[in-house]
Image (spheres, rainbow, N blue to C red):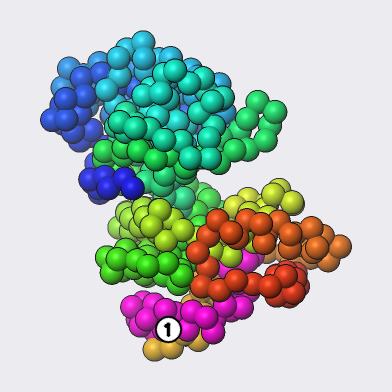
Amino acid sequence: MPEPEIIEGFGCRIQIGRVCKESGFDAVLILTDKRLCNLGYQKSVEKALETENIGYKVFDGIITEPRLEYIETGRAIAMEIGAKCIITIGGGSVMDTGKMVASGCRLRHLSADMLLQKFLIVPEKSLPIIAVPSTAGTGAEVTVGAVITQRNGGKFASVIVGLDVHTVFLDSELTLKAPWNITASCGIDALSHGLEGAVADVKSLPDDIEKSRKCVRLVLENLPKLKEHPEDIAARGAMCLAANLGGNAINKQLAGYVHAFAHSIGAKYHIPHGKAIAMCLIPVLRSQIDASAGQLSELAHFCGFDSVDALFNSLESLIALCDLDLNGTIVAPEDFKELSIAIAKDSVNYSAPMTFPRRQILSILSEINKQK
């Protein structure tokens, strides 16, 4: 698993030139998207690289979810300039594209299509990645997974074995202009990673358990502040850290049924991921409360609550505050059977504290449908 150096702070990306110089990265490829380029967020990175006489090229052609053509173009540019490092500036699409480009540069004998393997093994590690996430949600800057859109429009999920994330810059300046709905949606996603990591049925190191709990606490404490004060730099920074800790939870503890439900419902009804997570979070967690009672109790106390009920009340209040327009009628009863099959299939990839029988999955779908 990647264990990058984490550098935090508003505007901290100006240190990228120094990190590249000290690491011997004398030529780098900057991967980003059009929107961020229009905002000029990569300019300070370019200046930092120029100050240290480090050669670079920018590929800002990422305008949708990761696609094979982005990987092909990015790899071609990286190889052309002899890139020693890939710098990714952006959200999950940029991060996942960068992971595949960095891996593809080591696996030059494989076409972009052939990189789409369930477990993509990079024997000598990928090119090093310096990641600057622009959202505080997915934790994609550290996760070993990448979801790529295939040429037929379908999506393929790869796990990269040998991914080298060298440094992560948690620069809250990049999240400062995000509107509330994006901030809230990303924050709920990060929260779910921490929650599911904290109750996962997998042997975890104490440090990783604490990171998952800290992710939850940071979101509960800081996301509400950003609704009234979106320019609260300290709260923005805390949310960046929470997302990163949530990424660690995905790597070390996997996810659980919240994600299995959200993936299936989101795909069926084309619902944004953060909103789908918000719809599923409370019904799923309550359905497995007996199996995770001890872990939830410890999490509650870690977050400063005197009971699990108080923790759930706080979670429900936060979801309501996010105002993600949760319309329970969107999950149609006639789709329950189809959804239950998809959820059961997806859940085998995760480490939930219990296994739901089909009848319980149907019951939870009914609870989700009742939410207003």
Quarter of the picture containing the C terminus is bottom right
| Image quarter of residue 220 | bottom left
Amino acid found under the numbered disc labelled 1? Gly
- Residue visible at 72% across and 70% down? 358
Read off the magenta span: 277-305
Residue 50 in picture, x, y percent from top left = 21, 19
Q: Is residue 136 left or right of residue 81?
A: right
Q: Label 1: which residue?
A: 294
The answer to whether 327 is drawn above or below residue 173 in the figure is below
When the figure is inspected, residue 343 is found, relative to residue 78, above or below; the finding is: below
Rendered residue at 54%/32% (across/down)? 116
Q: Quadrant of residue 151?
A: top right
Q: Residue furthest top?
A: 80
Say if residue 250 shows up in the picture.
yes
The front one of 250 and 355 is: 355
239 shown above or below 133: below
Is 274 situated left or right of 90 in this image? right
Magenta: predominant secondary structure element? helix
Q: Is residue 101 magenta?
A: no
Expressed as whole percent of the image width and height from the top left, the position of residue 224 reads 45, 66
